[in-house]
Structures are given as C-alpha cells and as structure tokens.
Amino acid sequence: MRRLRILSNGLLLAALALGFIIVATSDGGAGTGSNGAIPSPIASAALETPMVKPPSAKAPTRKRPAASPSQKHSSAQASRTPHPARPDNSPPAQASRKQGSRQGDEPPAKRGGTVYLTFDDGPSQYTPAILNVLRATHSTATFFELGVRQAQHPTEAAQIKAEGSNIGNHTYNHPDLAALTPRQIQWQLAHGPRSSCVRPPYGATNRTVERILSRQGFRQVFWTIDTRDWSRPGTKHIVNAATGPSVRAGSIVLLHDGGGDRSETIAALPQIIAALQHQGYAVRRIPGC
C-alpha cells in the first residue's frame, strides 16, 4: 500500500515537471517571435516556400509560362501582323504564283481614264471604215486632216463630225512648217481645216511656228504613242504599239487614215479598241478641237 502511494506521488511529480517544461518551452518560442529575433535558416525556408508536396515526381513539363500583360499585348500585335512569305516550295506559295500567272496573262484590269486615238492625213476612202469601227465600239477620235483632202472627200469630212468625232488642222498640203516663212505658215494654217487644234506635219515646229500659232489662238497637239502604221509594219505591230505598257490614261496614239494604203490600220483598229476597253480605258476624241 505504501509502495502504491509512493508510485502515485512519483507519477504526479513527473507529470507536473513535464507540464512545466512544455509551458516554458512555449513561452520562450512566442517571446522570440515577438522580440523580432532573426529566424533561423530553416524557419526562413519554411516561410518562403509553400509546404505543399508535388502531386507526383514527374519530370517538369515544357509548358510555357503564362505571358505577362506586356507580352500578351505584343502577341496580339503579332497576330495582326501578316505572316512572312512562305518558302517557294510550299503549297500556298505555289498556289499564289499560279493565281498571279493567270492574272498576268490578261491585260491589267480597269486602269481607268481615257486614251485618245488620232488619225492623220485624211480624209480618204479609208475614213468611213474607221468611223464604222468607232461607232460599233461606242468610241470617238480626232482626225487631223489636210485642207486639200477635205476638198477631195467632202462627204467623209462631214461624216466625221456627224459621228461625234472631231477634226484638227494638219495644214493644207502637209509641208514642214519649220522650213517655211511666217507668211507661208500663216497661209497653210488658213487653208487647212477649221479647228482650234493644230498638228504640225512631221511634228516639226520651232519658235516661229509656236509664236504664230499662239497669236492666232491655236493649240499644238502632238502624240505620245507612235504606231508607225504609215510604214505598214503589220497589223500585230500596230496593235501592240497602240495597247502596250507605254499606254496610260491621257495617251495620244498616232494613226493614219490617209497618205497611202491604210488597210493594216483598218484591220488593227477593232483589236486596239477592244484591248484598251478591256484594260478599262475609254477611247475618246481630244476635247477642245
């Protein structure tokens, strides 16, 4: 009985001692934190690193990290930027080249503007055929005529105006005005067709010619495209010259309806107008003549 009491007292003392130790230890840890003491390296690691175990020991994935707001903005801009050209051997590039070749086989579509066809040295027996083509294609032109030819073909001259085309002065009988005296120049102009536009024969002019034309209120009109149809180079050459890459809106094309055999010009004219209209040009007379 005495031994049991001693054992109980011993256990009670041991329990009291153990409780005292626990309380003391707890008070000391709390005091360290409140006093601002520097934590140990282990405690620092515990505060900075989440104490969460990875779900598995798998190798790290190659997933890209989330982009920052600035990176996302850059990506959005990049998505709106056209991609660089693909290599030549890729299917999309081949398809685009095929499409471009189909377009390149045709004249440029719808350039717009007006091209002015002009016919020199008439009127003649070829003039009615030219007027027929112009009528059929809803086109007009300017005829730089000679006074002597108007007297020989009065019907053709009248038909030009009736069809909506107009007439320019190409002198009386086609001399080189730059080689004439002022009085001779004035005579040639006075006996040429009545018009406010003058095309000096051969395109030959000088200061004397320009001064006389200016005083009499004439406007010199030359050309920008010379088909050289007067030399009879062949229908294909005439068509190519009148519709080639040099032609632009406002171009003035030189052709002839008089002065020789103009059968090649007659044959080329429908093709010329069709090609120009396909490119988007209107074929019209020069305004103000």
Image (spheres, rainbow, N blue to C red):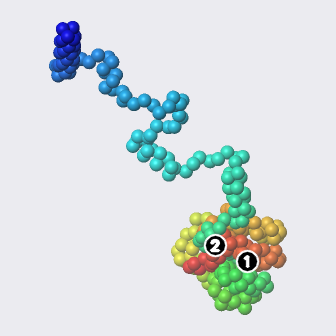
**What residue is pinned by disc 2?**
281
From the viewer's perspective, tell me whether residue 195 is left or right of residue 145: left
Name which residue lies at 55% across and 69% down: 211
Q: Is residue 39 left or right of residue 72?
A: left
Describe the element under mark 2 as helix, strand or loop.
Answer: loop
State the quadrant of the N terminus: top left
Residue in view at x 81 percent, y 74 percent: 264
Q: Position of residue 153 (x, y in %)?
A: 75, 88
Mark with earlier residue (2, 1): 1
User: Amino acid type of disc 1?
Assistant: Asp
Q: Amino acid at mark 2?
A: Tyr
Question: Dot 1, how many residues are within 10 Å of its Cα: few (below 14), some (14-19), or many (20+)?
Answer: many
Residue shown at 52% from the left, 74% from the top: 215
The label number, if any, that marks residue 121 in the structure image: 1
Quarter of the rendering containing residue 19: top left
Foreground: 21 or 269? 21
State the image quarter where residue 230 is shown. bottom right
Residue furthest front in the image = 1
Q: Which mark is residue 54?
A: none
> Relative to 59, does residue 184 appear above or below in the rendering?
below
Q: Residue at x 72, y 65 (%)?
A: 106
CA separation in Å, label 2 and label 1: 25 Å
Q: Nearer the viewer, residue 201 or 163?
A: 163
Relative depth, front residue between 236 and 23: 23
Task: State whether residue 142 appears in this view.
Answer: no
Of circles 2 and 1, which is in front? 2
At mark 1, the secondary structure is loop
Q: Quadrant of residue 152?
A: bottom right
The location of residue 122, given as percent across then percent down, is: 73, 80
* Quarter of the figure that contains the C terminus: bottom right
* Image x and y of residue 222, in percent: 64, 69
Crowding around mark 2 (Cα neighbors within 10 Å: few <14, some 14 to 19, many 20+) is many
